[in-house]
Image (tube, rainbow, N blue to C red):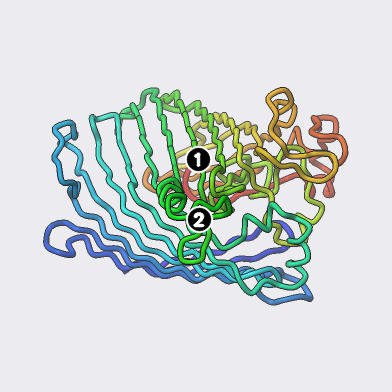
Amino acid sequence: MRFDFETNTRSGSYLGMLSAMTYTHKNQFNGAERLDVNLSVGAETQLGSDGRFLNTLELTAGVSLSIPKLLLPLKSTSIYQDYVSRTRFNLSNAYQIRAGFFTINRLSADMTYDWRSNRLMRHLWTPISITQNNTFNIDPEFAAELEENSRLRNSLEDVLILGGQYRFIYSTQEIGKTKPFLFLSGTVELAGNLPNVIASAVNSDDGVHRIFGTPFSQYLKLQADGRYYFQYSDHTWAFRLVGGVAVPYGNADIVPYSKQFFIGGSTSLRAFRLRQLGPGAFINPDAETVNFFDQTGEVLLEFNAEYRFDLASYFKGAVFVDAGNIWLLNETFGDSGEGAFRFDTFYREIAVGTGVGLRIDFDYFVVRLDAAFPVRKPVFGKGLEWTFNQLDFLNGHWRKENLVWHLAIGYPF
């Protein structure tokens, strides 16, 4: 049995807390099958607010079973025998109340095969994944906002996601050795193709097809992650390049909200808070006062560079630069057409941040504190601009508006 408790803060005087309980049995059926059952409760409030006491309440429950073999009708000789291949079954449900906005319930189930073809290459194939998203109890004021924002309204509609995913991981890292290594990961996710073929054969209507009264999503999502680490005895240069695109088609005009990209936060562009950058040059005027949900996109591009060095004993320092943004494929924000991805202009909308970090590294456990600030960011009515001439670390107002702190567990990449 494992019990966890965590607390976090973010801009706008928000305070969040979460407690979780996990039961694990590593030999459930006397064959090294691993069973995990988890339950968690999380909540967030805004200190000093005259409004609601709780802004967000989330209840999650899940069960997973991992079997140490591939449950396939045919055996393959190309499987790397020094790695334990596994078949995983997962079932989970997340119930989230966003006070003043809506309530959403997400029920998911999937099966995944996990194996290696050699020492360097790992494969994860999810032939079937089912997710049911239901949104209800929509606040009347928020419903009025949805009428003005078709993209957000369509993103939050009830939808069934029926598809699959394939992911490969290639890594030249050798445990216990300090030497440069390469890490590559690629993911292909498809949803809605099979049900659309069946629905089209049964019903020739050109409208939106449904399963048991619920429309299903159809999209293709691609994502790639490449990293290179120059490791030495007392310092490391780490680089990461991430890109992704999600394309709706067929039975859907928009990718489900849970499958869209977002940027910012402790493992991304650290000079920007989670979901508070993009798409493109868009600026959300209410980001500091309300829980805004629409700063997501269908195109992602991100680059990170970090220099890590030893200070003393378990203490390590870091200097880093992060750059990137997200964009929309087929839609824009406002009359100015902000947020759309265009090959001839996207490079002008790359946000850049930098900062320093302090880490306590016990090898098996890392506590990380990063302080970051933007040097190229969106400026209302002007697109993205460099802000070197505005740096003023001794000015309290500048620090409040620009300095972002992250306390996290583990390295960002």
Q: Which mark is residue 216?
A: 2
State the residue in front, 249 or 30.
Answer: 249
Q: Residue at x 68, y 35 (%)?
A: 353
Q: Is residue 208 left or right of residue 127?
A: right
State the residue in front, 346 or 38.
Answer: 346
Q: Secondary structure at mark 1?
A: strand
Q: Which mark is residue 199?
A: none
Q: What residue type is disc 1 on?
A: Lys
Q: Is residue 69 left or right of residue 413?
A: left
* Percent x, y of residue 96: 56, 68
Q: Residue at x 30, y 35 (%)?
A: 122
Q: Which numbered mark, 2 or 1, is in the foreground of this view?
A: 2
Ranked by sequence position, the earlier of labels 2 and 1 is 2
Q: Which mark is residue 221?
A: 1
Reply above or below: 389 against 335.
above
Q: What residue type is disc 2 on?
A: Phe
